[in-house]
Structures are given as structure tokens and as C-alpha cells.
Amino acid sequence: MNRPSVALALVHHPVLDRRGDVITTAVTNLDLHDLARTALTYGVERVYVVTPVAEQQRLAGRIIGHWSEGFGATYNPDRSQALKCLSVAETVEQALENFRSSVPGPVQPVLTAAGCRDGMSIAAARQLLRDESLFVIFGTGWGLAPEFFERGWATLEAIHGPGSSNHLPVRAAAAIILDRLLGDRDF
Amino acid sequence: MNRPSVALALVHHPVLDRRGDVITTAVTNLDLHDLARTALTYGVERVYVVTPVAEQQRLAGRIIGHWSEGFGATYNPDRSQALKCLSVAETVEQALENFRSSVPGPVQPVLTAAGCRDGMSIAAARQLLRDESLFVIFGTGWGLAPEFFERGWATLEAIHGPGSSNHLPVRAAAAIILDRLLGDRDF
């Protein structure tokens, strides 16, 4: 890969619950499958499943192994190809470091938040992507914990449709953001 | 509602399995939650859960009832609001008729298919949406059965990212299509 690329991080800790407390969410089979399939569609290099919990790291590893090497690989080769883009990481820093070591140019970490109204525009992110790779960070639960927003990292402008709410599932938000960043804009 | 609107249909029969045989898929809790939340974000009028199986209709009804009226409505009011946009229908025709009776102007049914390369463009669909409501039909499993494509209904051009595959989960495909149809295009 010589051109800039995109990686995603799906963070299970530290994230918020619906009351705003910092928690650790559980890795779900479905998030991994959905993100992997969407990532493959958009040519995303790598999706990092971030959890500090050793048992959850093993669970994620078993899901990836089942579909990319085990019975699932024979049963559904497309799924196998998709799940190969998944990696498990203990922290976002570890995932970011891994992605930085795997691409030649600079890497910009970009946070996502459903409540962000004055963040980096999609137009700016698309422009950035001409020269730099993006490491786009999604929180599970009720979103990334405040500590992420104290690091000086950019936050992407939230998705707002014409509806009354933007409580998108993280699977849908990631799909829409990848389409906005990497999809054709001929309409 | 006096302006044109959008409804979705999530079809569980007749759809294809991975070998191309016509099957009936099971209603899943997660599809309903994800589509409802995405629909609410984009101001979609209604999401029809289409299944001819009475027990599956009851299951879908129980899920909707739990979150929109039962314990779930108190526990998570946002989710309650989202799930109220869901309706159960026995067939696509029944769902389409229901949607037609609920909006003032004309309604165009539009099929979706991952393999469609020469379908209606998103630009054309956005244009159409100025004057007519759209009823966008998604298949679960490996997609809508061939019989749908013999009715003279338009098919939306498939989503193609820069990646090697477009095996998007139906939850992600619906989110991306709603964003393309109804999202701001200022980038």
C-alpha cells in the first residue's frame, strides 16, 4: 500500500453507558461481522477490536479464527476474506501504533461522537485522506469516554439526517462514515 | 406529511440463500433495532418487517411491543421512539398498499440488489424523491428472490466501494442508502 488508507478501531473500553458512567462493553459477534464486511466493501485496511479484557480478546480471536481459518472459512469464503481484516488490540494506542507501523505515510487519529457539531467536516477528512492515512475511532455503548477528547485528536462532525435523532447503531454509523469518506460522490 | 417520504421494507420471504435457493429467513431482533434507529435518524416514515410466517409476525410484534410500550419503553425512551416506526406485514404488496394509503402523493417501489450495476442511480432517486415517495425494498439472506425483478419495478444501483467485495450486511446497506438518498450532500 503506497496510497493513504483507512483503519477503524471499535473501542469497548473506556466507553460510556447510558447514564454517562465509564464502562467496558462486551465484544459482540455481530459487530465484528458487520464491520468486517463493510470494511472489505470500502477497502479498509484493518479493523481493530479494542478491549483490555483478556477473556474478551480471546473471544474476539476465536470468532476471527473460526471464520478466517476454521469451518467457517470453507462454509463461507467471502466471510473468511472479510474477517481477515480484523485484529485484536488491548488499547487504542496499541492499535494506532500497529497501524502506523503498517502504512508508509503519516496517520491521523480521528474520533467519532454522535453529539459532535463543530468537528472536522467530511470534506476536510476526504481532503486529508489524499496525503495521510486515517485511523477512525468508534465507541460502543453510548460512545467514547471523555478522556479521548482531551488528547488533541480531531473529531469528525457527527452524522445528522433529517430525522429527529441521531442514535445510530455503531454498525450503521461506521458504514455511513466509510461511504462518506471513501464512496463515489457522483450524485 | 405533505412532502414525499421514504419507507423501507425488510423482506424475509421470498429471498435467496447462498446457493440461490428461495427460502424464508428468520426475523432478528438486531435487524429490527438497527433499521428502526437508522430510520429515525433519517426521518423515514415506516419500516415494514415482511414475513408470511405467523409465528415470526408475532415475534416481530412482541419485539416492537416490548420496546415501544413495555418495560423497554421506560428503560430506553429513545429506543421506544425508534421502534414505533416498525410495522409487520405478510407480503410486500400488503406493505406497499399500507404505505400508499398513508401518504398523499404517488409512491414508487424500488428494489435493491448487491449485484445491480445498471439500475436507477442515486441521483435519479434523489430527483424522484422531490415529487414521489419511495418504498425501498431490501432482502435478508442472500437478497431478494428473482420474482421481484419481474414486476417492472426499478432497481437501485448497487453500492460499490473501492474494496474488492460488496457483501454488505443489510443493516449497513440500508444505512448507506438512506444516507445517500436523504443525507446532506455538502462534501
Image: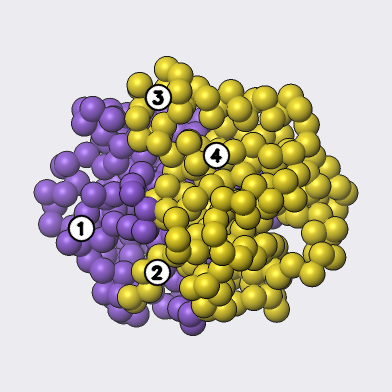
Chain colours: A yellow, B purple
- The type of residue carrying mark 3 is Ala
Query: Which residue is labeled 1 in the image?
Result: B117
Q: Nearer the viewer, mark 2 or mark 3?
A: 3
Category of crowding for the residue at label 1, using alpha-carbon neighbours closer than 10 angstroms: few (below 14), some (14–19), many (at least 20):
some
Q: Is residue A105 left or right of residue A79?
A: right
Q: Quadrant of residue A12?
A: top right
Q: Quadrant of residue A124?
A: bottom right
- How many angstroms separate mark 1 from mark 2 (CA)? 18 Å
Dot 1 or dot 2, earlier in sequence = 1
Residue at position x 36%, y 44% in the image = B167
Q: Is residue A92 above or below residue B18?
A: below
- How many angstroms separate mark 3 from mark 4 (CA)? 14 Å
For residue A73, the mark is 3
Q: Chain of mark 1?
A: B
- The type of residue carrying mark 2 is Leu
Percent x, y of residue A90: 74, 39
For residue B181, the mark is 2
Respond whether the residues carrying marks 3 and 1 are from the same subunit. no
Name the image quarter holding the N terminus of chain A: bottom left
- Residue B133 appearing in the image: no
Q: Chain of mark 4?
A: A
Q: Are marks 2 and 3 in contact (CB under 8 Å)?
A: no
Percent x, y of residue A100: 63, 55
Respond whether the residues carrying marks 1 and 2 are from the same subunit. yes
Depth check: give the residue in front, B44 or A23. Answer: A23
Q: Chain of mark 2?
A: B
Q: Identify the secondary structure beneath mark 3.
A: helix
Query: Which residue is labeled 4 in the image?
Result: A86
Percent x, y of residue B123: 30, 75
Q: Is residue A16 left or right of residue A118?
A: right
Percent x, y of residue B55: 44, 25
